[in-house]
Image (cartoon, rainbow, N blue to C red):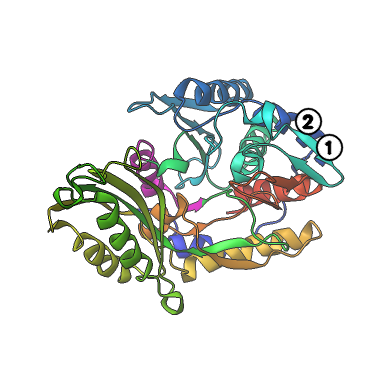
Amino acid sequence: MRPCSRACLLMKDHPPMPIAMPSSETLLEELRRWVEIETPSADPAAVNRLVDLAESGLRAAGASIERVPGHSGRGDTLIARTNTGTGNAPILISGHLDTVWDHGQLLKDMPFRIDGDRAYGPGIYDMKAGSFLAFHAVREILRQGVATNRPITLLLTPDEEVGSPTSRAIIEAEAARAAAVLIPEPAGGPNGCVVTARKGTGGFTITAKGKSAHAGGNWTEGRSAVVALARIILAIHAMTDLERGITTNVAPIWGGTRPNVIPPDAGCRVDFRVAEAEQAPEVIAAIKALAGEHDGVTITVEGGLNRPPMVESEAGLGLYAQAKSIAAGFGYDLPKQHRGGGSDGNFTAAMGIPTLDGLGCTGHGAHAPDEHIRWRDLAPRGATIAELLCRL
């Protein structure tokens, strides 16, 4: 039996913990090392180079380290634990190290650079800055011997950008033991909002198999997979219902070989988002109903829901109230928002674990060439994370 319920822990009021935090300039200098290690999800060796760096820093500070070997073409997952607050359920803070950017982006189009109060680089906003701040907070708590009310578990995962296929089970196992979960995904919008709700996300791969023929001499003998796929794309696009918070998107699309051949093969990927858990079966059923054979073209549909919606909860709002109060002590406001993109916080919130997301750095341009953070916010945002880890 735990000494305090998850709802109870959110209401505790403790004095600030004495954590010495470096300047934003100092934090940015170390963060630069993280950004300049390119970590595309599909390259486990590259991701593991950053795992190595994080592991070295946490081990030297005295963390208990567990490293789960990667599989299925993904990197390792790093689990670091503190031993303060023994006897209480831990606080889990979970970030990812992979990015959507391929190798070479750093040298070609997105070199690390500072322009005024902005720092640019691939993955710096989503979410190397946030994962670094989580790492830094845990390392400083250990280095400085700060007593925390609960143990802290830090997860650094390798595959969030592709749906967390190898890390989801680890995240959920650690969350099941935790009193609360913090996710340092990027802060949102110009005001740097944290996230108390997210849409559920899912995806499909659709393939069409037709029959090739000469596009001139034997047109009637062919069955165009591209034409069949085009009809399906329009049907999926029509499933978007903005008023209900349901969106669909089709990309990428492929098919055909050359203009004078009726295309026998075509396919696409589908992304869908739902605001409420009850909407997911509806969308999934509608897309799966497109499978089958029509006029000589066979349609195959594979996929489903990946991340359930993160629904705003009373316990999550209790976490938010704590974070907002701490942020005020560091001189800034901390608004909240609901966000359309998914994160690993979707998994933990769906388990009923109090979850607060979007605790990373301010900035803009996730997955875009102008990706950047407002680097002067590193110190106050990092201090808020550290303080929250101590107080809960």
Question: Which element is circle 2 on?
Answer: helix
Name the residue that disc number 2 marks. 29
Image quadrant assignment for residue 259 = top left
| Badge number at residue 148 | none
Give the total number of marks visible in the rendering.
2
The magenta-colored residue range is: 165-181
User: Circle 1 sits in a helix, a strand or a loop, which is it?
Assistant: helix
Viewer-closest of 371 and 261: 261
Dots 2, 1 in contact, CB < 8 A: yes
- What is the distance, in whole Å, between disc 2 and disc 1 at their CAs? 6 Å
Residue at image coords 28%, 41%: 261
Disc 2 packing (10 Å; few <14; some 14–19; many ≥20): few
Judging depth in this view, the residue of 147 and 82 nearest the camera is 82
Quarter of the C terminus within the rendering: bottom right
Residue 334 image-quadrant placement: bottom right
Q: Is residue 17 in view from this perspective?
A: no
For residue 364, above or below residue 86: below
Please, what is the three-letter code of the amino acid marked with disc 2?
Glu
Mark 1 surroundings: few (<14), some (14-19) or many (≥20) residues within 10 A? some
Residue where numbered disc 1 is placed: 25
- What percent of the width, then of the height, locates residue 212? 20, 42
The reply, left or right, for residue 92 in relation to residue 362 is left
Query: Is 65 situated left or right of 235 in this image?
Result: right
Who's the residue at 21% across and 61% down the image? 290
- Judged left or right of residue 145, residue 69 is left
